[in-house]
């Protein structure tokens, strides 16, 4: 079983930057891909970015502003958020699985989430 712990959320002004971190523990040998999702109040959870051996992929809403990266030795994935907007306000969740396709389809393990609030 994989455990995921997110950190780095907080309050940031429009146009600012924030970096989220997710650390995996437990059965990490089963992880080949990781990603980020977010859920705003009253909305469904949506895919933000993913990274795996297949490459990286982003939601259109964050392309050019967010960057996902990974440190395999530390079983850690990062989400660098630049030029943030009020609509980026959400709880951000980490996801991990065997393939990037499974991460994109939200089939993997979940963390507890970290709140990001962007003020206008």
Image: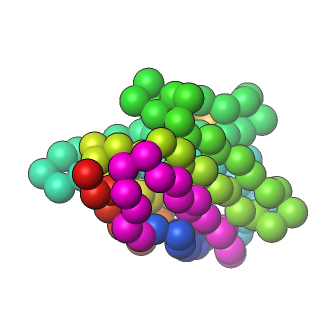
Q: Residue furthest top?
A: 60
20 left or right, relative to 69: left
* 53, above or below 115, in the image: above
Structure colour scheme: rainbow
Residue 37 vertical position relative to residue 4 in the rendered view, above or below: above
Instruction: Assign the magenta stretch its main secondary structure.
Output: strand
Look at the image and give the residue range highlighted in magenta: 10-26
* Image spot of residue 32 (x, y percent): 73, 47
How many numbered marks are there? 0
In front of the other: 46 or 109: 46
**Residue placed furthest toward the right:** 73
Residue 41, percent from left and from top: 17, 55
Residue at 64% from the left image edge and 44% from the top image edge: 68
Does residue 59 appear in this view?
yes
Q: Name the residue rendered at 71%, 62% in the picture.
A: 76
Identify which residue is drawn at 35% across, 44% down.
85
| Residue name at image x 53 percent, y 36 percent | 65
Quadrant where the N terminus is found in the figure: bottom right
Is residue 24 highlighted in magenta? yes
Residue 48: image x %, image y %?
A: 46, 40
Instruction: Tell me if residue 103 can be seen.
Output: no
Instruction: Find residue 75 and report its horizontal and vertical position in percent.
Output: 75, 64
- Residue at the farthest left position: 42
């Amino acid at each position: 079983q994989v455990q995921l712990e997110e950190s780095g959320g907080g309050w940031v002004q429009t146009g600012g930057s924030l970096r989220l971190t997710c650390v995996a523990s437990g059965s990490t040998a089963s992880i080949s891909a990781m990603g980020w999702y977010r859920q705003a109040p009253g909305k469904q959870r949506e895919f933000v970015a993913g990274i795996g051996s297949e490459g990286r992929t982003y939601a259109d809403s964050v392309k050019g502003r967010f960057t996902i990266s990974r440190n395999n030795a530390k079983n850690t994935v990062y989400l660098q958020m630049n030029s943030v907007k009020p609509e980026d306000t959400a709880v951000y969740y980490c996801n991990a699985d065997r393939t990037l396709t499974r991460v994109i389809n939200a089939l993997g393990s979940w963390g507890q989430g970290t709140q990001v609030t962007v003020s206008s």
